[in-house]
Amino acid sequence: MGDGEARVIHGDAGQILLSIFEGGGSARFRLYFRDPSGQAVPPPARLFSVETFRVDGTRETFDFVPLGDGYLEATAGLAEPHEFEATLTVTGGDRDDTYELLFVEHDHAPAHDHSRGLRAFVLGALHIDHGSGADGHSHGAP
């Protein structure tokens, strides 16, 4: 898939993996889906969006469209640095769900000033895992 580490959201229906894919153009968010046993499944019939919050106060919202191999990809590119808080919103069904995530650069710059702080790593019972892949370079999926 070309994605490296991912933010993994664990839910009753399985997992949502949010990644930043960097390959052949501008970096973009991707969403992958797994059933409770960890097997890849097609995207559910719901709407997904991500809003980023950077330490300088800028915000950006990303919508998603289905692409090959059963994943969703953001319709707009993601600027560097890939260091921000993000809120994933899942709309549809009987309720809307939101998940708070944190992306931190590890290898593009020699040092980062974390003194300003970021809003939150996790809200509620959200659990974040960090997976890794062999292909491509990313800050986010399997």
Image: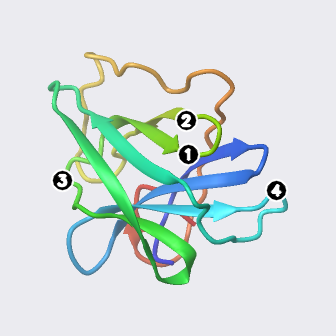
Find numbered disc 2 in the image and state the secondary structure of the residue it sits on. Answer: loop
In the foreground, 44 or 71: 44
The residues bearing labels 3 and 1 have C-alpha atoms spaced at a distance of 28 Å
Residues marked 1 and 4 touching at CB (< 8 Å): no
Q: Where residue 27 appears, x then y in whole percent?
A: 27, 64
Residue at mark 1: 92
Q: Earlier in the sequence, mark 3 or mark 2?
A: 3
Lower position in the chain sequence, tag 4 or tag 2: 4
The colour scheme used to paint the residues is rainbow
Amino acid marked by disc 2: Asp
Q: Earlier in the sequence, mark 3 or mark 1?
A: 3
In three-dimensional space, the C-alpha distance between marks 4 and 2, rounded to whole angstroms, equals: 20 Å
Find out whether the residues at labels 1 and 2 contact each other: C-beta distance under 8 Å. Answer: yes
Amino acid marked by disc 4: Pro
Residue 96 numbered mark, or none = 2
Q: Which residue is mark 4?
A: 36
